[in-house]
Image (spheres, coloured by chain):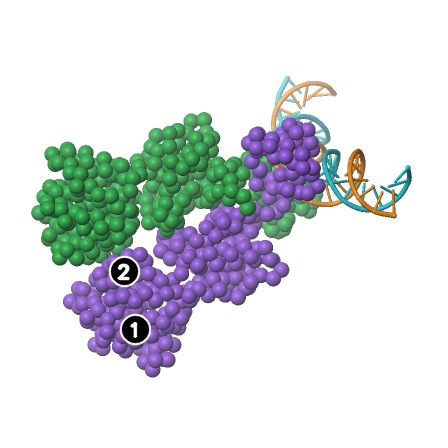
Chain colours: A green, B purple, C orange, D cyan
Amino acid sequence: MVSIRDISIKCGVSVSTVSKALNGYKDVGEETRRLVLKTAKELGYVPNAHARALKTNRTFTLGILFVDDQNNGLTHLYFSHVLNSFKSEAEENGYNITFIHKRWGKQTITLLQNCKFRGIEGVCIACVDPNDHEVQELAKSDVPVVSIDYIFPGCGCVLSDNRNDMAELVRYVYSMGHRKIAFIHGTDSYVTQQRIEGYVSTLRELGLEVRQEYMLESLYTNPYTTKKATEKLLQLEDRPTCILLPDDVSAFGAIEAIQEAGLKIPDDISIAGYDGVVYSRLISPRLTTVRQDTDKIGREAAKLLIYNIEHPQNPKLEPIIVKGELLTNQSVGLV
Amino acid sequence: MVSIRDISIKCGVSVSTVSKALNGYKDVGEETRRLVLKTAKELGYVPNAHARALKTNRTFTLGILFVDDQNNGLTHLYFSHVLNSFKSEAEENGYNITFIHKRWGKQTITLLQNCKFRGIEGVCIACVDPNDHEVQELAKSDVPVVSIDYIFPGCGCVLSDNRNDMAELVRYVYSMGHRKIAFIHGTDSYVTQQRIEGYVSTLRELGLEVRQEYMLESLYTNPYTTKKATEKLLQLEDRPTCILLPDDVSAFGAIEAIQEAGLKIPDDISIAGYDGVVYSRLISPRLTTVRQDTDKIGREAAKLLIYNIEHPQNPKLEPIIVKGELLTNQSVGLV
DNA sequence: AAATTGTTCGAAAACGTTTTATAATTTTTA
DNA sequence: TAAAAATTATAAAACGTTTTCGAACAATTT
């Protein structure tokens, strides 16, 4: 590996001069600068990030904390999209991204230790159990954190506007004439709570009764548990006319349950998904759903994290809320 | 940040002794070792990865090269699964993972330079244009590379067994009585070539004619282009009785085209997907498809890369081929 | 002509480690 | 008991940078 030293020898100047020339300091003559740059290129010089990090205490590395909640990790339908844009935005700003984990060689260490150890400048927390002790420790630490769809006190965060998006969906369904609107929601989380709040408060606002038997729980992106929940709703003596589902993938389970019950969508019953995956408009029935703006969420998270890293004295801590988009389609019919 | 120095002062020993105690060298007394370890814990010491990397030239960092081919990047249906298991396997072996890109601060640098710069010990190339000049340069360089579903001369690789899996699918379809089997394949790539080879050679093997009009191209995971291709096949005067598709997501396009043509699956025509996504068994019709073993592919890739990093003198270069699994279902009917 | 300012450069310390070579001490062997 | 061997510790160099401080000199101002 060719170092700054090699350049200095070849050019007959000191290492400090080379360093300065390379880093655009002004106190180096135009001629020597050109010489240094030229021989650096000739020698195929590549700087050493670790030496630099050691000296400057800057690594330009962002960590991502991303733990399989249902062991789907990186393949998570929603978060993988968020991450993808997070990555793009970060890289466009000259930051590297890496994953935080608990391993150091053969040993197990703390998430926070992993960050300190590797000099990670800030971390994006997505898709983890926020009650996990080590996650809490990290969030409370001095390393800047932004979280997605969850609020850690004292940390930046970017939130998908689940509450209002859900409210909009409910209002739309209402406008289509539905009065008996059920909601199969995902397992408990900040997101689920927000959606439930949006659902409940909008029902009230519209003068509809909130019925416990219309609110069932399922796992996210799990068609099987959603099928079970749908079956329960269909067996109700006062059956809902519309079922709101946890997400688009779950919708396959609901569709199956409904078809097996000999009912037709949307003639006999309506459904709506959530997420707006590509094929939601291609399956039969075409799904009414809510598209979350994953691209914006990821980019805002990266921008926020970088801002907070570069302005440690007055970081932005107010939640950034990103609105989704209602995609109406044939799965919700007029009643 | 507390350093080795601080510990040495507190313990009244030299830094070298502390370093040795921490790293399990044998030439340090049992008593001093205990003292060092104890005060290290007390002081909340965390080693500095960069200082260590500078000295040892080891970073335990694997790079992932992963470029949006259709701008889907991390959300790629197949590669995100492969990556997920790659990440797990790597972390379990004490390696970190990070993404390779072309940025260094405000400047644009080479992929190879990025690796050198950051001391990346090996890279996994997945989902990129293999003809890209910089990718080639990286593959030819001295940094260990393993590729997924592509062969770079002189590099390790892990391949999904597309050729044989495809052959098995064709044979199955044949066994169901089909003789006019069309194949809508994805855009040109190593994977596509393998599948076409499997398709063509198996047809020949079975004594069937290979008909150019039965081989159409579409984009992967793009229901729209697949719909168009399907329509073309349906308009053929000697229509196929079975259509093999590029993947499960594309299947939605094919299903739509078939339904719009007033045909029923599998009574009038059969289809088969590829990938075996979760909901392939839930859509109507339930899809016959091939599940690629993404978990094994990712893990094997990580193991191979780590092996080659740790055995630079005799790296394993023979392709590792991972077999898929045929998932038969109702979308292919008896004829 | 002296004093001031500006420009270009280099020496050296520092960042936090690892590791080699050697010294000091203790234990074992003859 | 002396010599040899084993044990434990340290000093110091090195890894590749950045950055402070001051030196040397030239250019400008008084």
* Chain of the residue under the numbered disc 2 shown in the image: B
Instruction: Identify the amino acid type marked 1.
Output: Val
Q: Residue at x 23, y 35 (%)?
A: A197
Q: Residue at x 65, y 36 (%)?
A: B33
Q: Quadrant of the N terminus of chain B?
A: top right
* Chain of the residue under the numbered disc 1 shown in the image: B
Q: Is residue B31 above or below residue B210?
A: above
- Labels 2, 1: one chain: yes
Q: Is residue A18 above or below residue B320?
A: above
In this view, the residue in front, A128 or A99, is: A128
Asked whether residue A38 is in view, the answer is no
Instruction: Identify the amino acid type marked 2.
Output: Arg
| Label annotation for residue B225 | none
| Label annotation for residue B281 | 2
Q: Is residue B74 above or below residue B26?
A: below
Q: Is residue B83 above or below residue A214?
A: below
Quadrant assignment, res B212: bottom left
Q: Residue at x 66, y 31 (%)?
A: B8
| Label annotation for residue B173 | 1
Outermost residue to the bottom: B207
